[in-house]
Image: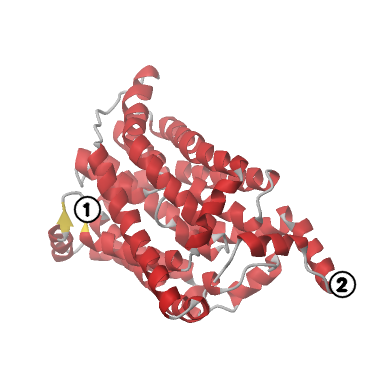
Amino acid sequence: MRPYDAPHEGVSANEATGLLMKLSFLDRFLTLWILLAAGLGLGLGQISAVQDFIDDTTVGSTNVLVAIGLIVMMYPPLSKVRWNLVWRVLANWKLLILTTVQNWIIGPVVMYLLAAAFFNDDVGYMTGLSLVGCARCIAMVVVWNALAGGDDEYCAAIVGINSVLTLALYSPYASLFINELPRHMGIEASEVHVSIGEVAKNVGIYMGVPFALALLTWFTLTRAKGTTWYFSKFTPRIGVLTLIALLFTIVVLFSSQSARITDNIDKVLYAAVPLLIYFFVMFIASFYLSAKLGATYEQSVALSFTAASNNFELALAVAVATFGLKSDPALMSVVGALIEIPTMLALVYLAFWFKKVLFAADQSHNGEWEREGGKSPVLETESQGHYCA
């Protein structure tokens, strides 16, 4: 059983942690496999034949291997979304405003300020971190949300909103945070011109393709085989694809930047500091605000992971197209992935702890109602608005 194949409604924080301990050997040590995959990628990247192969599979600024890995990785979590319920994210306008402000005001500003504070004398690395901060997550967040037992429909809806806003805002945001603000702060600026076509292409590849495949699968198989079969048989069977594709993508990413990472290990370690500050500040603040605004645990997970994570694929594509594959901004985009992936996995465990701290009252009330033989009003509300495969 994988974390995102298990039922989440009414599960206590201790039960959720126990559920993780009952996972298969592969799933329980996911952090180890991620680190080993990164190490394998760094090692393979030192072989010239591997570098040549990666170069041969790159079309423009898009590496075909990375694109395939990301699409396959996103497909299982998106396939288990009940798409007829996605529209319900619009029902709570307060949470809708919260996720928009977190993603498109607070997130980019916080990352820019951290980049300026840590790399004010190194415009290349500052530019790379700023590009990452402007790129709101539309890909791997569905994996982290599923692992933490978040609301799949809510996460899919936020990803959809972020995708549309990315098309409209990424280009002007990149210009603002890389060209204009540094000049006004007396910092040397980079000239970067990001076309709407470049952004649209990457959004289409990394979001459009897996979304379309998942939606088509859900629409056809639920009608051909029934909803029960689809969510109890089909989606659990394809869940392993996420782990395989995730590890494959990590190997390719770190192979492509192996020489750059090893030659600049001091900068990589230094860049980890602002990135870790960013991830934890955004996640903790988002979880707290979500809970205070009345979000359920499942909704808070979706809101917090979308606020804390970034679309390093888009940032890398823009950095490569603008500055080149061997540039400092491109290196920082890969470093962002290097730090983000294990950090997001750690935040999955932090989310379970928040469930005990911030949602203890809901868990207590649920238990009291069930002992009395009644239906918990909290669970009843969740059963009407949230479904997990």
Looking at the rendered image, the disc whose residue lies closer to the viewer, 2 or 1, is 2
Q: In the drawing, does residue 185 fall left or right of residue 255?
A: right
- The residue that appears at 80% across and 68% down in the rendered structure is 367
Which quarter of the figure is the C terminus placed in? bottom right
Q: Amino acid at mark 1?
A: Thr
- Residue 335 picture location, percent across and down: 36, 49
Q: Amino acid at mark 2?
A: Glu
Category of crowding for the residue at label 1, using alpha-carbon neighbours closer than 10 angstroms: few (below 14), some (14–19), many (at least 20): many
- The residue that appears at 36% across and 32% down in the rendered structure is 173
- Residue 186 picture location, percent across and down: 37, 18
- Residue 182 picture location, percent across and down: 36, 24
Query: Image height check: is 363 above or below 116?
Result: below
Category of crowding for the residue at label 2, using alpha-carbon neighbours closer than 10 angstroms: few (below 14), some (14–19), many (at least 20): few
- The residue that appears at 36% across and 47% down in the rendered structure is 268
**Residue 251, picture quadrant:** bottom left
Label 2 sits on a secondary structure element that is: loop
Q: Residue furthest right?
A: 372
Q: Write down the residue under mark 1.
A: 62
Along the polypeptide, which appears first: circle 2 or circle 1?
A: 1
